[in-house]
Amino acid sequence: MPELPEVETIRRGLSELIVGRTVVSEVHDTEKGFPNASTDVAAFLIGATVIAVRRRAKVLLIDLSTEHTVVVHLKMTGQLVFRGEQSFGAGHPNASLIGKLPDRSTRVTLTFTDGSRLYFNDQRKFGWMRLMPTIEVPNIDFMKKVGPEPLEADFTPEQFAERFKRRAKTNIKAALLDQTVVAGVGNIYADESLWEARIHPKRLVGSLGDNDFQNLYTGLRKVMNLSLEKGGSTDKNYLNAEGKSGQYLDHASVFRKENTPCPRCGNLVEKIRWAGRGTHFCPHCQK
């Protein structure tokens, strides 16, 4: 599943390409991926102009001039691909990002007045695009439950620590992955930030002190900002707005680096199954 930096990379790319464009037609294959009444589509999507592209955690929000928003969740295998005078593709790394579209994975196609198109592809059909009044977006169950954005300027280390302390009996890796604690942290950045903070993924939240939380806060923001700078962590078949692939994994310290030397101490990085995910850490640095 795309993580926060990947979804933010999509937001930035689409902001440059679809804001100001007007939707002239829409085609979808099933209601599961596009659960919207035809009357609403005709009234609030067709003829609407895109005025902004926002993000909350891993959810994209395409705001329209009709005071409606297309809420997009990519889930496991979703992609958004723009084709026009420029090309942009991001999401699950497979050939649909760079191949001829529509294809077998295309669930929704939005065509703009200039002939350019935005494709929503999803191999496993878990993702969706939902049209709803913009004012109602904060009332979606997910939006009411999701935690603060870790990269927001006003999200302090003290607030960060407080969010975790209510999960005292939970291991820190699982707590990091809990979207109600902090928004948008997935497996890659959980492993990388724990390595930065020298915290073992199995440690209970209640065993961590103020310095641990400060280090984790700093480490998480560091790896996420680096990933944004490098265009995300997808390492194959990925194009950003400049046609470049995501490069973060070239700079990762432990993720997918099992049996290679830790860049800090030289001991071998290990991989275990923890918190339901493949987990990478240095047994020497992260006691």
Image (cartoon, rainbow, N blue to C red):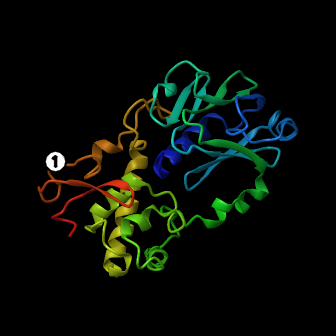
Q: Is residue 123 above or below residue 220?
A: above
Image point (72%, 33%), residue name: 21
* Front-lying residue, 136 or 279: 279
Label 1: which secondary element: loop
Q: Position of residue 118 (x, y in %)?
A: 64, 30
Question: What residue would you read off at disc 1?
Answer: 260
Can residue 209 be seen here? The reply is: no
* Front-lying residue, 160 or 75: 75
For this orientation, the residue located farthest to the left is 266
Tell me the kind of residue under disc 1: Thr
Q: Position of residue 158 (x, y in %)?
A: 45, 78
> In the picture provided, is 187 more to the left or to the right than 36?
left
> In the picture provided, is 38 more to the left or to the right than 257?
right
Q: Position of residue 39 (x, y in %)?
A: 88, 38
Image point (19%, 54%), residue name: 269
Image point (75%, 29%), residue name: 26
Can residue 219 be seen here? The reply is: yes
Picture quarter with the C terminus: bottom left
> In the picture provided, is 2 more to the left or to the right than 236?
right
Image point (47%, 73%), residue name: 156
Q: Is residue 185 above or below residue 48?
A: below
Number of other residues with Cα within 10 Å of mark 1, as a class: few under 14, some 14 to 19, many 20 or more: some
Q: Position of residue 248 (x, y in %)?
A: 35, 44
The quarter holding residue 171 reads bottom left
* Front-lying residue, 142 or 198: 142
